[in-house]
Amino acid sequence: SEIIDQLLIIVKDDSNRDFEILSIFWNWCKTQLNPGNTVMYQEFKKSFFENINMLSKWDTKDLFILMGNSLNNLDPSETDIEKELFDISKTMLESKIIFNRDGTLTASDFNLYLWRAFNANDYDAIKKFTDTYLNKIPDDKKEYSSKMSCAFILFGEGRFDEALEIISAAEHPNFITKVRMKQLKAKCLYELNEQEIFENEFKAMYHFLKNNKSLSIRIKADTKIIFDRINRLFRLKENFDRFEFEKLCKEISGSSLNKASWFNVKIKQLAINN
């Protein structure tokens, strides 16, 4: 670390521009060497945003992806990760970095924007983005992406049975979208009070994660946490226990700064009803 810092000082004497650009990448490296360090993440973000105009479009896109990876290591009780992730997608859209060289958009980038907007509870952004940019993705991907956008919007409108119908009928193209839709399906089942169906999904989810080696450890862990918490919400709804409620409430409030997040809303509803 000290050696690289000294080298950067030498570079700065020769070219301040090169120093600023190399500092961005070094600050990102430090977030990986010190995963979970909020201060180092903010230093990386600050240096990146202050000097973003010095970078090529493709270096900038890569750094936004790296920023998302760094975010996933942070403590959600200290950083509103869902908001930060959606801010990345919004900035990529505003600066047109999200688009390919020919102005088209990959289906994966399109769907990621929808997913991040959904997790940030920005349903207006989902509708506007879909209306404006669905025609930018390949023709053979449009139907699926349109359906997922519709499912998110229906969920936001409280039309959980309709959202569930779309999710259940769709052929999800890859493992990551399957995981995301399993998470959304579990939330729909809770809203519809379909505990028995959820329990079957709960068991199937563990089998799915175990047999899919391509999914990251983080995605698997997060999915297990989501299903476990929904399972506990079901039990508390059926048979309220103050000790278990307080325990779950502490876990949920400590895992998201977004008070409007789905779990925070559900735990608040349980408190009101009991």
Image (spheres, rainbow, N blue to C red):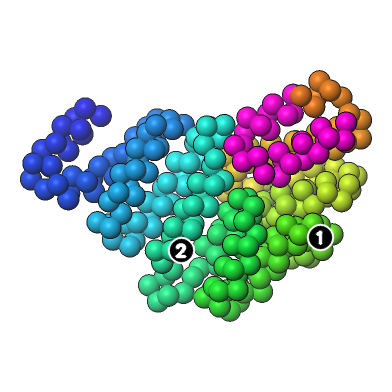
Please give the residue where the numbered disc 1 appears in the rendered image.
159
The answer to which quarter of the image holds residue 249 is top right
Horizontal arrangement in the rendering, residue 227 relative to residue 87 (left or right): right
Q: Callout 2: few (<14), some (14-19), or many (20+) C-alpha neighbours within 10 Å?
A: some
Q: Secondary structure at mark 1?
A: loop
With respect to residue 113, does 243 lie above or below? above
- Residue situated in front as seen by the camera: 175 or 17: 17
Residue kind at label 1, given as amino acid type: Arg
Please give the residue where the numbered disc 2 appears in the rendered image.
93
Placement of the N terminus among the 4 image quadrants: top left
* Span highlighted in magenta in the image: 247-274
The residue positioned 69% from the left and 36% from the top of the image is 225
Q: Secondary structure at mark 2?
A: helix
The residue positioned 57% from the left and 67% from the top of the image is 129
Residue kind at label 2, given as amino acid type: Leu
Q: Callout 1: few (<14), some (14-19), or many (20+) C-alpha neighbours within 10 Å?
A: some
Answer yes or no: is residue 101 visible: yes
- Residue situated in front as seen by the camera: 139 or 116: 116
The answer to which quarter of the image holds residue 222 is top right
With respect to residue 114, does 273 lie above or below? above
Horizontal arrangement in the rendering, residue 89 relative to residue 262 (left or right): left
